[in-house]
Image: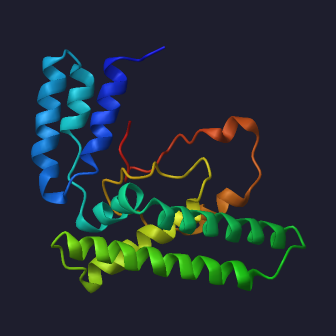
Amino acid sequence: MDSGPDLRAENDIAALFRLPLEAFTQARNDLAASLRKQGLIEVSTRVKALPKPPASAWAVNQLHWQRTPVLDQLIAAGDRFRQAQTARLSGGGPDLRASFDERRDALALAVSTAAGILRASGHPPTPEVLRRITTTLEAVATFGTTAFAPPRGRLIADLAPQGFEALSALIPRGSSASQRDDAPSEVVPF
């Protein structure tokens, strides 16, 4: 069954995050106006409220849209590192060094690729922007494919560094914990 306007709106929203950074605000405003004309007032209001991502979050989004294998590699390495940590906490498991090194190398590749995307789009990858990209990608790797992971390609802000709350991904939960009530505010709320 086709969800009609909702599916089209979802695709249009996703397309906003593929655009060059400079085009985001005008395209967002145009989309909100179009949705309003279609009678999708609630969706239009949410789209209009979307902030333009900072260059660092935009670059991480572009890893999803333009260099998916690089982002997939980082997320997979993050998952393997988390699994190795879980095994260690359970009293066994392999040495963490190999999975840590794999995650570190995948992170370096992802940061370098994001910097290249920024450079190619005319945005300088300053040390501060690179720090924010690195922190965001570290958070993405930490979340991996858990239920807590932010949706790919739709960051509206940099992700915060992960602290003790990241360890919650290691705690076994019942089936009722598949949804998180306090989803990160750094992603599109759709």
Report the residue at 28% width, 51% height from top: 18
Instruction: Indicate the quadrant where residue 31 lies.
Output: top left
Report the residue at 53% width, 40% height from top: 181
Q: Is residue 94 left or right of residue 104?
A: right
Q: Is residue 150 left or right of residue 75?
A: left
Residue 124 in the image: x percent, y percent? 19, 79
Residue 21 in the image: x percent, y percent? 18, 58
Residue nearest the viewer, comparing 88 with 6: 6
Residue 27 in the image: x percent, y percent? 14, 42
Residue 185 in the image: x percent, y percent? 38, 49
Q: Residue furthest right?
A: 92
Residue nearest the viewer, comparing 122 with 130: 122
127 lies above or below 58: below
Residue 161 shows up from this direction: no
34 lies above or below 69: above
Residue nearest the viewer, comparing 119 with 57: 119
Residue 63 shows up from this direction: yes
